[in-house]
């Protein structure tokens, strides 16, 4: 039985843990800005647990495809050609049908945003927060399984991966964003003598609308990108990825049912370039909250640049992009820790995490033993449908990704600098399956060591033990990304040296831990260089990006003379 259920008390027909009870009280207190979030406890889905039976039942609700509309204000729109979201592990199975918004619909959605903004921006922050805390409670309780099931089927996450993402991380984003919004807006400037002059700060939402452009790989990120601006009084267009429409729609519906007024967030699946062209052409674009590849972000940034003379405000651009994350192993490292951490980081959810380890630097003295251990673990790793909890590796997201990944594997097979020591097989007859693959490269600058592949592929470079510092420098100059990175080292002096050396090469840096698995409120997330603008989602500074404060000075003593005081007669 999971700890969560063991501690649970049944109240008003809902399962609620002691922790959640405290949170609901905290929600009431939030009206006085004292709300403190805690991370959502995770369910463990042991076979005999009630949540496992509940999940099975919920999965049945998704046997037939769900038709997902475009939602603008209160209107559901179903346009022309129907799009399909398929199960990546069984591509004959359609999990959702949906519709691409045309430029006309997108323009209508912007108008609807701007109309809704008039009231929404004026609402007290606490009222806005309360809606999203209600959404967090709904996801934590009665709607949890809808998010888990739709993420499992649509994005091919197994139950543990879906629980971390679609339940725990999304709930955490909602609650911590509220906490940070309340804390950051509690700052008021000093007033030396408030009877003479009162200074204050008004936390305004931005003028215009935000475009939230979402990736496929995290339901929580899809849910966060339009919601964080909304908490701060903004309005946004939610553009889900075509391969995550269903789970994103489930989250959108929950926000609306929790009390989000129509038009504050409009749900607009759309062809990527059509969406990008339309929003960047609007004079009302206030900001872009983007997560996805660096290539797409650069294209949007360029389009904003080209339109600069047409905007009412300078749009704010937030972009969280890709990575080529390394595990750098020092000769003093704990081998078992390296092996377990690297397999989890590189292959969990098929390496389709921006933070996944995709290059491994290992000293030659350690490699024979580490290789043996990694291969031994991989012989136990199972690949298959995400509906089977035993499968750590499932299918990659779609046919396009499959073809791209296969291209890298074919390249490795034909290149003498690269040796495949595990995996290397791909099969898309039923689903888009790519075996967890380990490739050893004798060329430290190989494209497999440099480019983001977003796949279950780990490339290893074995270095001479005497060349730690040279190899650190080599690793730093190999890839343009700076997202996550890990060092495995037990020697204290070496640890300090390596941490300093990688200061600008990872926005999220791990010491003796794997490069994935950041938790909201614990490891705020983001990288720099080609990995993005490093605004640190899940941390306090993120929320400040969504406000455009106004400073007000009010004087109660009239100015009686225009001269400087000592010159007054
Ligand atoms: N740093 C992070 O926090 C983080 C988190 C998750 C994913 N990622 C990155 O995201 C990428 C994987 O996600 P993806 O495959 O969905 O990325 P992607 O760039 O292909 O797509 C992201 C979104 O952009 C949209 N899009 C595509 N072209 C567009 C255009 N011209 N204008 C506007 N929108 C457009 C897509 O439809 C999708 O919704 C990887 O690079 C991964 O590292 C980063
Ligand atoms: N929070 C995630 C990153 C999401 C990127 O895809 C992690 O650290 O595993």
Image: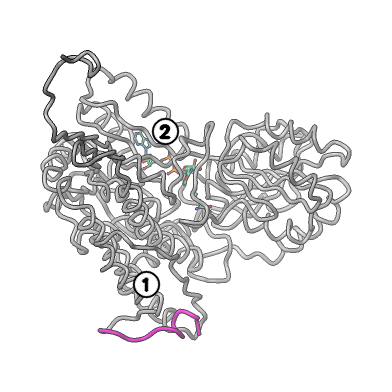
Marking on residue 488: none
* Disc 2: residue Cβ within 8 A of ligand 1's nearest atom: yes
Q: Nearer the viewer, residue 127 or 194?
A: 194
Q: Quarter-wise, where is residue 545 in the image?
A: top left
Comparing labels 2 and 1, the label whose residue is closer to the camera: 2
Q: Nearer the viewer, residue 235 or 281?
A: 235
Q: Position of residue 50 (x, y in %)?
A: 42, 84
* Disc 1: residue Cβ within 8 A of ligand 2's nearest atom: no
Q: Position of residue 475 (x, y in %)?
A: 71, 35
Whole-number angstrom distance, CA of label 2 to CA of label 1: 33 Å
Q: Is residue 17 above or below residue 135?
A: below
In the image: residue 320, left or right of residue 30: right
Badge 2, how many Cα within 10 Å: few under 14, some, many 20+?
some
Residue at the image position 31 percent from the left and 58 percent from the top:
96
Q: Is residue 109 above or below residue 511?
A: above
- Verify whether residue 4 appears in magenta: yes
Q: Nearer the viewer, residue 523 or 427?
A: 523
- Verify whether residue 334 appears in magenta: no
Segment colored magenta: 1-12
Q: Quadrant of the C terminus?
A: top left
Element type where label 2 sits in the image: helix
Marking on residue 296: 2
Q: Is residue 395 above or below residue 282?
A: below
Per the image, the residue denoted by label 1 is 59
Q: Quarter-wise, where is residue 311 in the image?
A: top left
Residue at the image position 79 percent from the left and 46 percent from the top:
362
Residue at the image position 22 percent from the left and 44 percent from the top:
235
Q: Is residue 203 above or below residue 476?
A: below
Q: Position of residue 275 (x, y in %)?
A: 28, 35
């Amino acid at each position: 039985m999971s700890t969560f259920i063991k501690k649970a008390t049944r109240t008003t027909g809902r399962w609620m843990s002691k922790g959640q009870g405290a949170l609901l009280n905290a929600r009431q207190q939030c009206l006085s800005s004292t709300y403190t979030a805690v991370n959502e406890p995770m369910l463990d889905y042991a076979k005999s647990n009630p949540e496992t039976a509940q999940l099975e039942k919920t999965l049945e609700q998704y046997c037939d495809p769900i038709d997902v509309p475009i939602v603008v204000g209160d209107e559901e729109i179903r346009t022309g050609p129907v799009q399909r979201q398929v199960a990546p592990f069984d591509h004959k199975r359609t999990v959702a049908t949906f519709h691409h918004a045309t430029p006309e619909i997108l323009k209508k959605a912007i108008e609807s945003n701007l109309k809704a903004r008039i009231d929404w921006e004026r609402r007290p922050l606490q009222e806005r927060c309360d809606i999203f805390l209600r959404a967090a409670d709904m996801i934590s309780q009665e709607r949890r399984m809808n998010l888990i099931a739709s993420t499992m089927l649509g994005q091919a996450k197994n139950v543990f991966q879906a629980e971390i993402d679609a339940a725990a991380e999304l709930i955490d984003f909602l609650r911590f964003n509220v906490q940070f919004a309340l804390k950051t807006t509690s700052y008021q400037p000093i007033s030396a003598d408030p009877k003479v002059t009162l200074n204050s700060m008004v936390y305004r939402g931005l003028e215009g609308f935000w475009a939230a452009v979402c990736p496929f790989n995290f339901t929580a990120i899809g849910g966060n990108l339009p919601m964080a601006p909304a908490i701060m009084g903004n309005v946004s267009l939610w553009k889900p990825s075509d391969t995550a429409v269903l789970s994103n729609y489930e989250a959108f519906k929950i926000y609306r049912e929790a009390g989000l007024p129509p038009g504050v967030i409009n749900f607009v699946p759309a062809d990527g370039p059509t969406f990008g062209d339309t929003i960047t052409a609007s004079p009302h674009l206030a900001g872009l909250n983007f997560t996805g590849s660096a290539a797409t972000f650069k294209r949007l940034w360029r389009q904003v640049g080209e339109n600069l003379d047409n905007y009412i405000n300078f749009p704010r651009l937030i972009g969280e992009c890709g990575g080529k994350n390394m595990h750098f192993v020092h000769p003093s490292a704990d081998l078992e820790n390296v092996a377990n951490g690297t397999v989890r980081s590189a292959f969990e959810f098929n390496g389709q995490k921006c933070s996944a380890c995709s290059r491994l630097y290992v000293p030659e003295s350690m490699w024979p033993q580490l290789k043996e251990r990694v291969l031994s673990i991989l012989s136990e790793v199972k690949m298959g449908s995400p509906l089977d909890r035993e499968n750590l590796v499932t299918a990659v997201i779609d046919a396009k990704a499959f073809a791209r990944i296969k291209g890298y594997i074919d390249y490795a097979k034909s290149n003498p600098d690269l040796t495949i020591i595990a995996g290397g097989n791909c099969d898309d007859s039923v689903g888009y399956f790519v075996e967890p693959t380990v490739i050893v490269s004798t060329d430290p600058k190989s494209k497999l060591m440099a480019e983001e592949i977003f796949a279950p592929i780990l490339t290893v470079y074995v270095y001479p033990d005497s060349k730690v510092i040279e190899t650190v420098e080599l690793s730093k100059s190999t890839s343009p990304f700076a997202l996550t990175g890990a060092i495995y080292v037990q020697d204290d002096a070496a640890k300090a040296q390596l941490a300093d050396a990688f200061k600008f090469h990872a926005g999220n840096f791990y010491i003796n831990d794997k490069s994935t698995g950041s938790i909201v409120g614990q490891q705020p997330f983001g990288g720099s260089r080609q990995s993005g603008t490093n605004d640190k989602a899940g941390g306090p500074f993120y929320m400040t990006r969504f406000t455009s404060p106004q400073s007000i000075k009010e004087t109660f003593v009239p100015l009686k003379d225009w001269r400087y005081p000592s010159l007054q007669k």
